[in-house]
Each structure stands twice: as structure tokens, then as C-alpha cells.
């Protein structure tokens, strides 16, 4: 049987336009990075862009493969910092059937409100992080502002104070109780997410920003060859098994699924 039938395509595509973020959140995996991927050895943020021609090529490849699902233009970066964002957003809307659904901390939208009408209806949806609110009144005020500002684009909100994933390389990871039962849960991220870093390197999942699995580089290989490679399919299938996380060093300490245990217990 054809491998494209037995191993489905991704359901979410994340294309990292650049490496930078204007915040340094304790729950983010970039917080402790000193590798040169997000921050240098001194902890200063790295500022690198994905070349536009590569970004267009990735988008076009996904379209030509028939992909019509969700696309994001960031990984661990703030997407709206990139001055090309509106250009790419319009291209996705006009030339593909994908839905651009991005996450933002909202700072750029607050500083440059003129961007809102240019993005409204072009971006399918934003999840806006309310990272600085300290009271319920501030929270409601921010939510009301963005809901009234966007007329066509859907908006939702993220409040890490209320729900925070335990991400490796974050400060929260070191300080939060971790339930070892989470390490025996199957992981389906590698079967559902295609993550492409700003330098073209492909991550296995949201916890693999260092690209430790060496799946390939989208500047040098096709998305088709990377996704349906024997190596990627083998890793994804192993992790989909209960206890599969124990087969890989990076996954042995991943508690990303811990919330699933809490929800089942509740």
C-alpha cells in the first residue's frame, strides 16, 4: 500500500518566519536557550529571518500537496514583528485554501493599531496572549478591545496564569510538579504537526526546537520527502505507542501531556 495512504499528512503547518520575540516569558522554551537558536551564549536574543523565497516555496509546496488546513507563521517567535507578515498573510489568503491561524502576544497590535484593519479578514484567527494582565478587570478590558477591533478575524485568548504547558527549557519546567505518569502516555504530535524553523530545519514536535531528531531541512529537501521519510514515520509510530516516549532521549523528560492526566482525573 502507498505510504501516503497509510501515514496521513500533517494537520497543522508552522513556518517560522524569524527567530525573535519581544518578550521573555518564563513558560516559553526559549527562556533558557543559550544554543544560538533563539538566544546566544550570553542570553541575548538571536535575530534571523527565513529568506522570503524559501517561505514562499514551503507555502506553495504545501498547497500543491493539497493541504488546506491550519498554517502558522511562527514557532517560538512573535510573528507580527516581521514586516513581511502582511505580505505573506495576503499571499496565503489569495493563493491557497489554508487558514492562517496565528498566536501573538498582542504588543505589536497595541503599538501599531493601524495594522488591525490590514489583517482583519486576511488572518482567519488570532490567539492573543494576555501575559501582562494582573486583574480580572484588565483581562476583560483587553478581551473587549481586541474583540471590538477585529470585525472579521476570529480572536481567542491565552492566559498562561490559568493554563500553562510544562515546556522543556522553560523556567516553569524547573519549578512545576511533574507527574511521571505523563511519560507513559502516547504522543501524536509527530503525526499531526509539521514544524519548520527559520533556518529550514524541521522539528519533530513543539518540544524539539533544537531539531535533535535531524529529520531534514526544508530548504534542501521537499516537504513530501521529509514528512514521508522512513525515519519520520518510524519515530512517529513509536511515540504513538504507550510508553513510546522512553525510546528517545528528548521525549524521556517531556511532560507536555500532563494536562491530559489532570483532565481524566477530574
Image (cartoon, helix red, strand yellow):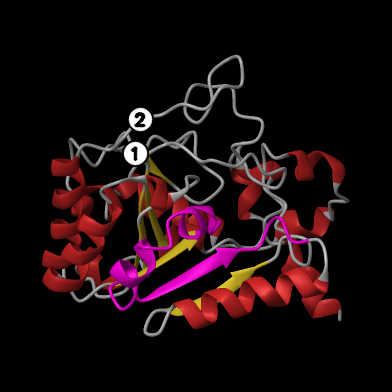
* Image-quadrant location for residue 71: bottom left
* Image-quadrant location for residue 51: top left
- Residue that appears at 75% across and 59% down: 182
Report the front residue among 158 and 195.
Answer: 158
In the image, farthest residue toward the top: 42
Q: Disc 2 designates what residue?
A: 48
- Report if residue 32 lies within the magenta region: no
Horizontal and vertical percent position of residue 11: 37, 70
- Residue that appears at 37% across and 41% down: 197
Give the number of callouts: 2
- Residue that appears at 23% across and 71% down: 67
Report the front residue among 84 and 50.
Answer: 84
Q: Disc 1 designates what residue?
A: 198
Horizontal and vertical percent position of residue 211: 45, 36
Task: Say which element carries label 1.
Answer: loop
- Seen in the picture, residue 131 relative to 121 is either above or below; the reply is above
Left or right for 80, reference 159: left
- Report if residue 121 lies within the magenta region: yes
Instruction: Evaluate if marks 2 and 1 touch, with contact meaning CB atoms under 8 Å apart.
Output: yes
Q: Distance between the residues labelled 2 and 1?
A: 7 Å
Q: Count neighbours of disc 1 (C-alpha within 10 A) and say few if under 14, some if 14 to 19, many if 20 or more.
A: many
Horizontal and vertical percent position of residue 227: 29, 54
Q: Is residue 8 visible?
A: no
* Image-quadrant location for residue 165: bottom right
Residues drawn in magenta: 104-133
- Residue that appears at 47% across and 48% down: 78
Specify the quadrant that holds the C terminus. bottom right
Task: Say which element carries label 2.
Answer: loop
Amino acid at each position: 500500500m502507498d505510504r501516503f495512504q497509510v501515514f496521513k499528512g500533517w494537520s497543522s503547518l508552522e513556518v517560522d518566519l524569524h527567530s525573535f520575540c519581544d518578550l521573555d516569558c518564563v513558560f516559553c522554551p526559549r527562556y533558557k536557550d543559550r544554543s544560538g537558536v533563539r538566544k546566544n551564549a550570553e542570553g541575548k536574543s538571536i535575530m534571523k529571518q527565513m529568506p522570503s523565497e524559501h517561505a514562499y516555496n514551503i507555502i506553495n509546496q504545501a498547497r500543491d500537496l493539497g493541504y488546506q488546513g491550519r498554517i502558522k507563521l511562527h514557532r517560538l517567535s512573535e510573528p507580527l514583528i516581521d514586516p513581511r507578515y502582511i505580505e505573506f498573510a495576503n499571499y496565503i489568503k489569495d493563493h491557497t485554501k489554508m487558514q492562517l491561524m496565528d498566536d501573538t502576544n498582542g504588543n505589536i497590535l497595541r503599538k501599531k493599531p493601524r495594522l488591525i484593519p490590514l489583517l482583519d479578514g486576511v488572518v482567519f484567527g488570532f490567539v492573543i496572549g494576555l501575559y501582562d494582565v494582573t486583574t480580572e478587570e484588565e483581562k476583560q478590558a483587553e478581551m473587549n478591545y481586541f474583540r471590538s477591533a477585529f470585525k472579521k478575524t476570529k480572536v481567542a485568548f491565552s492566559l498562561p496564569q490559568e493554563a500553562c504547558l510544562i515546556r522543556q527549557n522553560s523556567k516553569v519546567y524547573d519549578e512545576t510538579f511533574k507527574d511521571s505518569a505523563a511519560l507513559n502516555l502516547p504522543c501524536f504530535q509527530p503525526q499531526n504537526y509539521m514544524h519548520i524553523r527559520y533556518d529550514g530545519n524541521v522539528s519533530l514536535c513543539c518540544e524539539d526546537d533544537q531539531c535533535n531528531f535531524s529529520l531534514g531541512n526544508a530548504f534542501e529537501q521537499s516537504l513530501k520527502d521529509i514528512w514521508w521519510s522512513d525515519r519520520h514515520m518510524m519515530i512517529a509510530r513509536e511515540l504513538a505507542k504507550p510508553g513510546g516516549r522512553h525510546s528517545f532521549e528528548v521525549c524521556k523528560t517531556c511532560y507536555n501531556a500532563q494536562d491530559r492526566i489532570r483532565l481524566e482525573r477530574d
